[in-house]
Amino acid sequence: MFLTATTSPWAIHSLSAADALTRRKAYAQVGRLVRELSGGATSQAPKLAASPLQEDDKAYSFSLDLPGVSKEHLRIQIEDTVLRVETLEGAPRSYRAVYEFAQEIDSASSQARMEHGVLHLSLTKKVPVNKATELSIS
């Protein structure tokens, strides 16, 4: 039996959209785990409140504990699959966190509300658009 380049785990091959999404989800989970376990470097990151990340077909929902911070002191940015939450200069406490999701987030229909030091986020997923085109054979 001979090994060829195609049997190598490092072989370059094309991924289907489903495979790419599966890999993106796995890498996002690993990234979150690394950030959580490296406590010292990310000690300023907001901690998830009692409710864990909830996901359905249309949205992600979760809460962050941000005691002592008002909504006027927060900046929330959404770019594709990335959510950034940070306090502005002059806030009584400093928080900064970056979260990556498996699917793009629709910032226009997402919602955030602050209630008793807890930031509640409901992030609507963007509906994937099929950009495939057919090539005619001549």
Image (cartoon, rainbow, N blue to C red):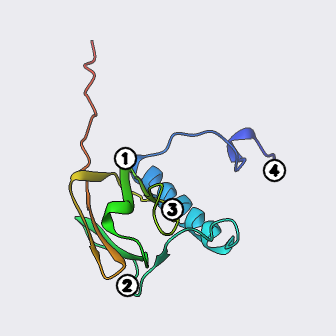
Say which of 12 and 1 sits in front: 12
Q: Residues within 10 Å of mark 2 (few under 14, many from 20)?
A: few
Circle on res. 97: 3
Q: Please state which of residues 46 and 123 is positioned toward the viewer in this rendering.
A: 46
| In front: label 4 or label 3 | 3
**Mark 4 / mark 3, whichever is N-terminal:** 4
**Residues at marks 1 and 4, CA–CA distance in whole angstroms:** 46 Å
Looking at the image, which residue sits at the far left?
Answer: 109
Please indicate whether residue 88 sits to the left or right of residue 105 in the image: right
Residue bearing mark 1: 80
Disc 4/disc 3 C-alpha distance (Å): 50 Å
Alpha carbon of mark 2 to alpha carbon of mark 4: how far? 53 Å
Total marks in image: 4
Q: Amino acid at mark 3?
A: Ala
Residue type marked 1:
Asp
Q: Which residue is mark 4?
A: 1
Secondary structure under badge 2? loop
Residue under the image location 51 percent in, 62 percent down: 97
Residue identifier under label 2? 51
Q: Residue at x 35, y 70 (%)?
A: 70
